[in-house]
Image (tube, rainbow, N blue to C red):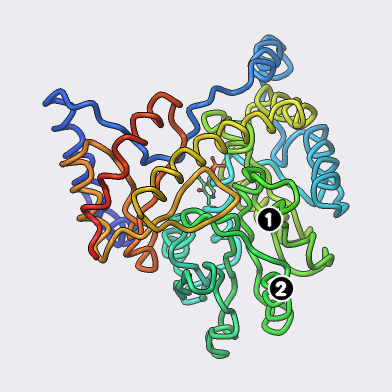
């Protein structure tokens, strides 16, 4: 077999391999493993969306190649929803449909990075930004997110020669894994620097709708800066908002030329999202108020239970009103902590270092499993205290 490419060889070692192996062994031994690792909602997609999909699948006109940018009726609905949620008016040709936001996020790097160009990537963060910067030949400049700054990075601390060579800067709040949210001052500062140094602000809003305080809804970048000409793009997802992870649909919206550059990569890569899925996503947006509040209620109930258990045990976690994760301090070696948690207590928790060096010392609990599993976890989580170094 010929050698695989340098880009494949340069991929980091799969961090979770040892944990996966340990999980397999535990299950073989008959241990009931409690998996709080993956951020994939257990809540089924709402019945009315499933019924809509059944109708749409029957229609022969949906069986042909879909449009590249996404069906105009979906894009119209999306900009309408965006206006209602964030108060910024876009036209349908300023947004594009994605095969899940991950697809758009990944391919976006090919639209702007040439060999040696810098992409600013927060650490910890969703690993796709860094990996695809490498695939595109770019260089990652890591900014560490620190708890004492509420996990907001300080753009002023990035050296000016780095900013001058920066093509993309990633921002993602509510943040996976830290759960932190951004305030308008943070976005204003990013905006100021984006204008000064002319880089693209790429905003990942996959968790924008998973919030628990109506008075503190997560902000969008455009909502704060109110400038649609700034080179910026936002990535939105149906996965977390509507518990539709398996359906694979997301949206990108923003500066028309930036969105169109992503479209050029996509037109030469994929052929769009199955139209029946697009029509179901449009229906989901039409029924947003019927569907999403109940999803929030379920995650909030679980969050309160788990937080109380951690609090009672004296485990320190970061307080946030968004995402379905809990981010807590676990000691200096998060991978060892996660292995011990599985080995001793049969519980799977994601080590923070899996999201970059900035995540070391922390671990992430995901609340995306059945309430009965959460109840069992609540009985076990306080025991983790003994694994956390003083
Ligand atoms: C921060 C973040 N962005 C984007 C995604 C991708 O979501 P999807 O491709 O399902 O829209 C995820 C998934 O876990 C995520 O955590």
**Foreground label between 1 and 2:** 2
First-in-chain label (1 vs 2): 2
Q: Is residue 42 left or right of residue 49?
A: left
**Beta carbon at label 2 within 8 Å of ligand 1:** no
Q: Considering depth in this image, is 146 or 6 the residue closer to the camera?
A: 146
Along the viewing direction, whichever of 340 and 111 lies nearer the viewer: 340
Alpha-carbon neighbours of circle 1 within 10 Å: few (<14), some, or many (≥20)? many
Q: Is residue 329 visible?
A: yes
Residue 169's x, y, as percent?
Answer: 58, 70
Give the residue at mark 2. Answer: 185
- Left or right: residue 11 compared with residue 260: left
Q: Quadrant of the C terminus?
A: bottom left
State the image coordinates of residue 222 (x, y, percent, origin top left). 77, 61
> Which residue is more in the foreground, 160 or 240?
240
Q: CA distance from mark 1 to mark 2?
A: 18 Å
Where is residue 202? Give x, y as percent.
Answer: 63, 62
Residue at 69% of width from left, 39% of height from top?
68
Give the SS element for disc 1. strand
Q: Is residue 304 above or below residue 109?
A: above
Quadrant in which residue 109 is drawn: bottom right
CA neighbours of label 2 inside 10 A, class few (<14), some (14 to 19), many (20+):
few
Q: Nearer the viewer, residue 204 or 1?
A: 204
Q: Residue at x 39, y 68 (%)?
A: 358
What is the secondary structure assignment of the residue under circle 2? helix
75 w.r.t. 199: above or below:
above
Q: Which residue is mark 1?
A: 234
Residue, x 22% and y 36% (percent of image)?
A: 346
Task: Check whether the beta carbons of the residues at disc 1 and disc 2 lie within 8 A of each other.
Answer: no
Residue 272 visible to the viewer: no
Residue located at (77% from left, 69% from top)? 230
Question: Total label count?
Answer: 2
């Amino acid at each position: 077999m010929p050698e695989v490419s340098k880009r494949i060889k340069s991929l980091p070692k799969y961090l979770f391999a040892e944990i996966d192996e340990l999980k397999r062994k535990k299950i073989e031994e008959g241990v009931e493993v409690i998996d709080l690792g993956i951020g994939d909602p257990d809540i089924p997609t709402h019945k009315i969306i499933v019924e809509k999909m059944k109708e749409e699948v029957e229609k022969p006109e949906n069986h042909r190649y879909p449009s590249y940018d996404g069906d105009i009726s979906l894009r119209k609905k999306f900009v309408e929803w965006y206006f209602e949620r964030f108060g910024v008016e876009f036209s349908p040709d300023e947004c594009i449909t994605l095969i899940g936001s991950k697809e758009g996020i990944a391919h976006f790097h090919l639209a702007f990075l040439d060999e040696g160009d810098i992409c600013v990537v927060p650490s910890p963060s969703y690993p796709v930004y860094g990996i695809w910067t490498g695939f595109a030949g770019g260089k990652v400049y890591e900014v560490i997110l620190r708890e004492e700054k509420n996990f907001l990075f300080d753009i002023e601390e990035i050296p000016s020669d780095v900013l001058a060579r920066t093509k993309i800067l990633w921002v993602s709040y509510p943040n996976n894994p830290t759960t932190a949210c951004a305030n308008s001052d943070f976005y204003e500062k990013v905006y100021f620097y984006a204008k000064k140094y002319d880089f693209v602000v790429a905003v990942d809003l996959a968790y924008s709708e998973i919030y628990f305080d109506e008075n503190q809804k997560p902000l969008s970048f455009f909502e704060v800066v109110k400038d649609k000409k700034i080179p910026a793009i936002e990535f939105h997802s149906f996965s977390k908002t509507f518990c539709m992870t398996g359906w694979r649909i997301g949206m990108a919206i923003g500066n028309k030329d930036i969105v169109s550059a992503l479209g050029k990569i996509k037109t030469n890569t994929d052929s769009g999202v199955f139209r029946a899925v697009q029509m179901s996503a449009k229906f989901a947006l039409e029924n947003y108020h019927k569907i999403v509040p109940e999803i929030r209620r379920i995650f909030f109930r679980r969050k309160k239970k788990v937080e109380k258990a951690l609090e009672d045990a004296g485990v320190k976690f970061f307080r946030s009103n968004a995402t379905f994760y809990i981010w807590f301090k676990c000691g200096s070696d998060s991978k060892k902590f996660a292995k011990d948690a599985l080995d001793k207590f049969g519980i799977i928790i994601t080590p923070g270092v899996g999201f970059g060096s900035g995540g070391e010392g922390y671990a992430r609990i995901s609340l995306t499993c059945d309430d009965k599993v959460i109840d069992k976890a609540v009985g076990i989580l306080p025991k983790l205290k003994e694994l956390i170094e003083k």
